[in-house]
Amino acid sequence: MRSFIDTNVLVYADSADAADKQACATALIAKHLRAGSGVVSTQVLHEFVNAALRKLALPLDLVRARVRLYSRFETVNASPVAVLEALDLHALHKVSFWDALILQAARQSGCVQLLTEHLQTDAVIGGVRIVNPFEGVAKPRGSKRR
């Protein structure tokens, strides 16, 4: 099943302070790489790099290696049309513009689900089901939404 992978999954794969979520994220990434069923967007890659450098303080070489790895997923670029469609999703579903842009990329790539902890689990927005892969996994203290 084609799945759009949100930034938080990639970040948790390198988050030493969230061992349960790290194991879950690493397994999801490996599964979708093997199956060729994972999709990300340039926005997700940008957000990952920002979090990896600032929040996780990963070495630059490791961040580069992760981007190379994640570039094996199908990658969606945001066109002006996609931005306009994301604005419509934002207005219609009352989600942040950035989440709407992620949802639009998932729709554009034909994904049936978005793997994220940032939206309401099991909601269907724009034809994409929201799945929280970390549901039931302990949340680390002090974690924040992007």
Image: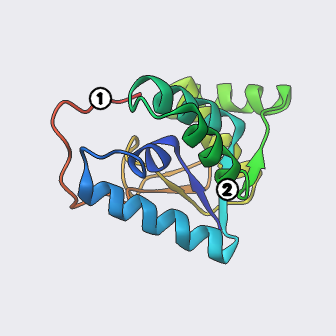
Residue 40: assigned label: none
* Residue 112 sits in quarter: bottom right
| Residue 1 at least partly seen | no
Residue 45: x, y in percent? 63, 38
The image position of residue 108, as x and y in percent, is: 76, 49
Nearer the observer, 61 or 33? 61
Could you say which disc has been placed on residue 39 in the image?
2
Question: Which amino acid is tagged 2?
Answer: Val
> What's the residue at 25%, 55% (across, down)?
19
Total tally of numbered discs in the picture = 2
Residue 67, percent from left and from top: 65, 44
**Disc 2 secondary structure class:** strand
- The quadrant of the picture occupied by the N terminus is bottom right
Furthest residue in direction right, as rendered: 80
Q: CA distance from mark 2 to mark 1?
A: 24 Å
Q: Residue at x 25, y 33 (%)?
A: 143
The residue closer to the viewer here, 97 or 77, is 77
- Classed neighbour count for the residue bearing mark 1: other residues with Cα under 10 Å, few (<14), some (14–19), many (≥20): few
Q: Quadrant of the C terminus?
A: top left
Label 1, on which residue? Answer: 144
97 lies left or right of 68:
left
SS under mark 1: loop
In the rendered view, tell whether residue 44 sits above or below residue 35: above
Amino acid carrying mark 1 in the image: Lys
Q: Residue sitting at 78 percent across and 33 percent down?
A: 78
Marked residue nearer the N-terminal end (2 or 1):
2
| Quarter residue 102 falls in | top right
Q: Position of residue 58 (x, y in %)?
A: 46, 34
> Do the CB atoms of the residues marked 2 and 1 lie less than 8 Å apart?
no
